[in-house]
Image: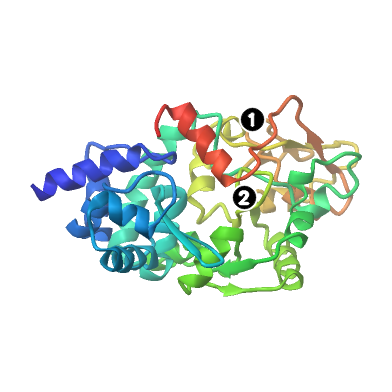
Amino acid sequence: MTEDLYTRLREYMNNLPGGYPATDTGVEIRILKKLFTPEDADLILKLNHEAEEVPVIAARIGMDPATTAERLEDMAKRGLIFRIREGDRVAYRPISFLVGIYEFQLDRLDREIVEMAEEYMPHLGLSFAHLENQQQRIAPVDSAIQDLPSVETYNRIRDLVKEQELIAMTPCICRRKQGILDNPCDRPEDLCFSFGQFGQYILDNEMGRRISKEEALKFLDLAEESALVLQPSNTQELSFVCCCCGCCCGVLQGLKQLPNPADFCRSYYLAKIDPDSCTACGDCMQRCQVDAIKEGDVMEVEPARCIGCGLCVSTCPTEAIELVAKEDLKTPPKDFDELLGSLAQERGVG
């Protein structure tokens, strides 16, 4: 009976926009059993996909409102459902495993969960790599686009950060995971930004701290200095920005394994090297997080591998590298709700 409950939970989560496909090993069920009690699973299965307030949920499932509120808030604090707080209004909705439940386990990671995640993430990533709608995209670092004649507003991350009223900073779950697996990374850990409802959720759950716009801009400088790829939500209005390294980030690790990473991520730029200006110093190759630059008499960018992050541009001593805009790419969805709607429609779920 309990096994059937977790199977139904797996199917329910696979019908969320981010998906949760089955595997031959059943690791996805083991993850659910690690995170959800049977009582949690039973309640989740009764939630609609859209956000609802406690009285609406309690009336529909036939549970006392006070008990409903207590249980929903407990699950929200454990990162199992999403809480939306707007003034006095509080609503709850289910969230995908990725981006969502997994990231919200930041303070509860142990070796068991990270080993299961290491087994499951490649399967999850490959299942959705072919989709046009992705939850994250690659954004260029600011110094790489300063001199370009026309840059879309949604690719100017620093300008978007300046517009935010609420900014929360958390440690990077990928670097923390690798530390637990005895593969520590020497890059800064506290470099993941959340904004708006995501940021409020982070602060309410005490997973991070609130920072000012000025602090955020300094952290973005540190991210560029540390050769970290900017991966914001694939939206015009920011929900989050992850600052990622190729040695820890699950997304970048997956892309590195492919012969053509550029075809499996949303990026609006491509790096090009002027052979007449290049001195083959190798700085760009050292900073590239997806092995897109090869060494010869001069350095060369492999277009099929380049994800357009701009990290190679920002430190080239001879200014031999520039970003070139790709053509005919679709504008990202307006916000995360619109993104999830597009993803659900493409997957045929909801």
- The residue shown at (89%, 50%) is 318
Q: Name the residue under label 1.
A: 304
For mark 1, give the secondary structure.
loop
* Residue shown at 39% from the left, 62% from the top: 79
Task: Write down the quadrant of residue 82 in the picture.
Answer: bottom left
Q: In which quarter of the image is residue 71?
A: bottom left
Q: Do the residues labelled 1 and 2 touch (CB within 8 Å)?
A: no
How was this image coloured?
rainbow
User: Could you tell me the amino acid type at mark 1?
Assistant: Ala
Circle number at residue 231? 2
Q: Position of residue 226 (x, y in %)?
A: 67, 63
Who's the residue at 34% across and 46% down the image?
Answer: 120
**Image check: 310 left or right of 78?**
right
> Does 291 sit left or right of 311 as displayed?
left
Closer to the camera, 165 or 96? 165
- Could you classify mark 1 by the number of other residues whose Cα lies within 10 Å: few (under 14), some (14-19), or many (20 or more)? some
Q: In this view, does 348 lie to the left or right of 266?
A: left
Q: Is mark 2 on a helix, strand or loop?
A: strand
User: Where does the image place residue 278, in percent across and percent down from the top left?
Assistant: 85, 43
